[in-house]
Image (cartoon, rainbow, N blue to C red):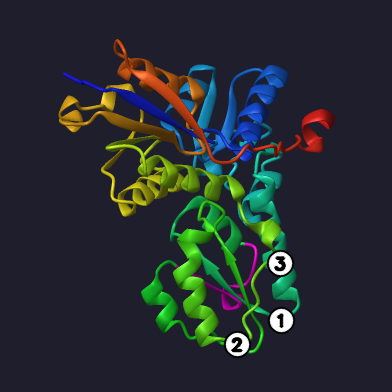
Amino acid sequence: MIKLEKIYLASPRGFCPGVRRAVEIVNLVLKKHGPPIYVRHPIVHNHHVVSYFEKKGVIFVEDLKEVPNKAVIIFSAHGSPPNLYQEAKNKNLHVYDAVCPLVMKVHLEAKKYQKEGYHILYIGHKNHAEVIGVIGEVSSNSISLISSLSEAKKIKPPETEKLIVLSQTTLSLDDTKEIVDCLKKRFPRLILPPSSDICLATQNRQNAVKELAKKVDLILVVGSKTSSNSNRLKEVAEKSGVPAYLIDDKSEIEIKWFDNVKRVGITAGASAPEDIIQEVIKYLLVKNVKVEEIEVNKEKVNFTLTEEINEN
């Protein structure tokens, strides 16, 4: 039996501006065209969001060969490589792009620096959709993927005078600090990207977890296993000395986790819906349990919809 005294809620938590925008785009395209519509790759990395749209007639695919000619398709929030746009054009697909504006900014930075003769040291997780999209923007000899500190120590770029660092947006300043410090030490002329490239939503959620960790015995992170930023939140909690569990929803909660736990913290990855978070809170909200929200930062960013939503 769970015997809690207090629940602490992290703020911000859940949907970031890029995810809200992507979800809104799918809803608007569904309303405009009706089902079925296609989405290349999960629109965001969350099981519940994908399941919600599948029930509304959205078909998720990885390969555009599965999409009929002239169909309506949305490219996911993670960004897509140029070859997919060409393939969509060849099939006369009606394309909407739900790429996060911050991810698009990194795409543009990559192309800009390649054109200026720089070699790009790109920090990210191999095979992540966002990473594949950015790497696809430039020639293979203009970019090197770095996924760990050990790789940063060994990397031998073809160019050492003109180097630029870019990174996957679901990685925070904390996530990349060791790698960036190593690269700066090895390559003194290394250029860092503008601070405006940094995804503050990722950093804000990690900072909130650090504050939670000071007050609780256990942290629950609501998010899917496929979500990079959700996994990082769990790691941040554990590095702060607090046991943490990544759960898709309340059904994955195990009573044994709460032995001797009086104070629990709850946060959520950037693609986790608020209604799922509220279900977790309700599940734990037994008699006399108090709830307190810990607000580390108030997010005011709101990404506007792309022009094609209004024009197409």
Q: Amino acid at mark 3?
A: Lys
Q: Quadrant location of residue 252? A: top left
Pointers 2 and 3 in contact (C-beta within 8 Å): no
**CA separation in Å, label 1 and label 3:** 10 Å
* Residues tagged 2 and 1 counted as in contact (Cβ below 8 A): yes
Which of the two labelled residues, at mark 1 and mark 3, occupies the earlier sequence position?
A: 3
Q: Nearer the viewer, residue 190 or 138?
A: 190
* In this view, 151 is above or below 31: below
Quadrant for residue 35, please give it: top right
Residue at position x 66%, y 56% in the image:
82
Residue 142 left/right relative to 170: right
User: Could you tell me which secondary element the residue under label 3 belongs to?
Assistant: helix
Residue 20 has which mark?
none
In the rendered image, residue 174, in percent from the top left (x then y), is placed at 48, 60
Disc assigned to residue 159: 2
Q: Which numbered dot is residue 117?
A: 1
| Amino acid marked by disc 1 | Gly
Task: Please state which of residues 223 and 6 is positioned toward the viewer in this rendering.
Answer: 6
Q: Position of residue 158 (x, y in %)?
A: 56, 87
- Residue 26, x across and y down, in percent: 63, 28
Alpha carbon of mark 2 to alpha carbon of mark 1: how far? 9 Å
The reply to whether the magenta stretch includes residue 44 is no
Q: Residue at x 43, y 61 (%)?
A: 126
Q: Mark 1: few, some, or many residues within 10 Å (few <14, many ≥20)? A: few
Q: Is residue 218 visible?
A: yes
Which residue does the numbered mark 3 point to in the structure image?
A: 111
Residue 49 at what x, y percent from top left?
49, 27
